[in-house]
Image: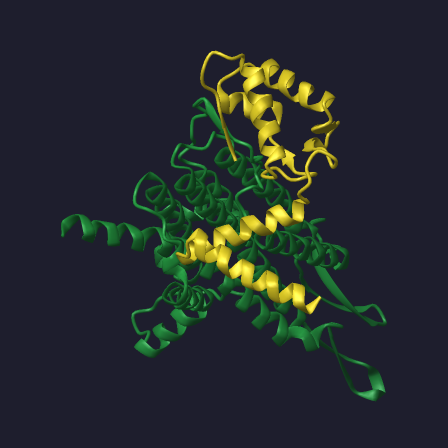
Amino acid sequence: MMISLAGSAPAADQISDQIRGLIAAGTLAAGERIPSVRQLAKDLGVAPGTVAKAYKALESEGHLRTHTGGGTRVSATASATPLAVVEAARILADTSLRSGVDLEETTRVLRAIWASQRKDN
Amino acid sequence: MYFTTSTFILYGAATMPDLVALIWFSFRSIIIGLALAVVWWLARGRKSRLPAGLTAAVTMTATSLALASILYLNAAIGFSVLRPPLSEHLPLWVFEMRILWALAIGILAVALLAIPIGAHTPRGHASLTRRTPFSFGRRRWFAGITTIVGTIVTVSALAGAASEPDEEGLWRNYTVDAGSSISFGTRIYGWYYSVPALILLAALIAVIIVALWLIARPSLSTNHDDDVRIRHLRTRNILAIASGALLIHLGSIFTSLSNTALLRGGADIGESGWGSWTTPFAAMQPALLYVGLAIAALGYALWFGVLLSAALTRRARADTDQS
C-alpha cells in the first residue's frame, strides 16, 4: 500500500486521490488505521498541512474519520471490504510468498477451499 | 555473602574435579543457556540470521559485551584472583547489589542495539502502514515481556512486604518469630534491593520503547521487503536482549528467595526440650532454587541466541566473500 507523488497536480489532491482509490479497490479496509499526518508528511517530504488538507477532504467525503487520540481510520461505510478479510488476505499473500507459491497457485487453492466451504455451508 | 553464589578462593592445591565443580556451580545457568541457544540455532535459528553489515556488527558487539560483562562480574565473585586490583576500594554495595547487574547491562545493550539510527529522508512515496514502536514486533513477544515484568513486580512486592528493617534501618531482613522473645532472622529480597531494581526496570522499559521507536520511525526504503525484514529482526533482538536481562534478574530473585527459605532456627523451650523453626515457605526452597536457575538459563539462552544470529551470519558471509 504505497502512495507516490509525481506530476504537477497539487500534492494534497494526489494524496487524497490515491487514498480514495485504495479504499475503492478494497486495499484499505473499513476501520483500518492509516498513518498520522506527521508520519505521512515526513515520508512524502511535504508540509504537514498538505497531508492534513488531504485527510480533511477525505473526511468531509465520508471516507475517513478522525478521533482525538485514536488516530485516523477508514470510515466503516467507506469500504465494502471488512478489515478482517483484508488482514486474512495479507497473511495468505505473505505465507504464499514465503513458501514460494505464486499468485495463480494461491488463487487456485483459495478457489478450491472456497468451493468446499460453500458446499459445507 | 547474601545471594546464592558461593565465594571461592583459588588455592594452588585445588584439584581438577574441584575446579570443574566450582565452574559448574558458578556458571551452570550460563552453560545451560548456551546449550539451549545452540539447540535453538541448529533447529530454527538459521532462518532469522542478520545480514552482514553494521546492524550485525553492532548486535554482535552489544551482545558480546553484555555476556562478557556478566560473565566477568560473576567470575569475580567466585574467583577472587579475577577481581580488579582496586576492587577493595569499590563500594561494597556494587557487589551486594549484583542482583541488579543484568538489568543495568540490559539497558546498555538495548541502547547500543538502537544503532544504526536511520535518517528520516523523504522519498516522494510512502507506505500507508502506521509505524509505531510496536509495528515490527509480534504480539506474543510483547505479551512475553509484559508477563515477565508483571511477575518481577509481583514477586518484588511480595518479598518487599515480607521484609523488615535491619539494625541499620535497611529493608532487607526477614524474621521468624519463635515466641517468648526469641526470633530468627536472615536476609530477604526486600525493598532495599527491589526499589533500585524497579527503578532500573522502569528505565529498561523506557530504553526499549525509545529504541523500538528509533527503528520504526524512519521512512521505509525503496527495498520495502528487506527493510521491513531487518526492522523485524532488530525489534526481535531488542526484545530478546531485554527479556533475557529480565529473566536473569527474575532468576536471581528466585534463587535469592530460596536462600531465605533455608533459614533454620532452634531454641531450648524448657521442659519440652528443643524446638526448631523454619520459614513458612521452607518447603518451596528446592523449587525456588531450580525454577530460579531455569529462568536465568532461559535468559542467557536469549542472549546467546541473539549473539549466534549475528555472529554466524557474519562468518557465513565472510566465507562466501572469500570463495
Rendered view: B132 above or below B29: above
What residue sits 69% from the left and 58% below the top?
A: B155
Q: Nearer the viewer, residue B249 or B244?
A: B244
| For residue A109, side relative to residue B183 (left or right) | left
Chain in yellow colour = A
Chain in green colour = B
Q: Quadrant of residue B156?
A: bottom right
Point out the image quarter for the C terminus of chain A: bottom right
Q: Position of residue B261 (x, y in %)?
A: 67, 70
What residue sits 43% from the left and 26% below the top?
A: B119
| For residue B212, side relative to residue B21 (left or right) | right
Q: Nearer the viewer, residue A26 or B181?
A: A26
Q: Quadrant of residue B2?
A: bottom right
Q: Position of residue B35 (x, y in %)?
A: 40, 68
Residue B195: in sight, yes or no?
no
What residue sits 44% from the left and 41% below the top?
A: B113
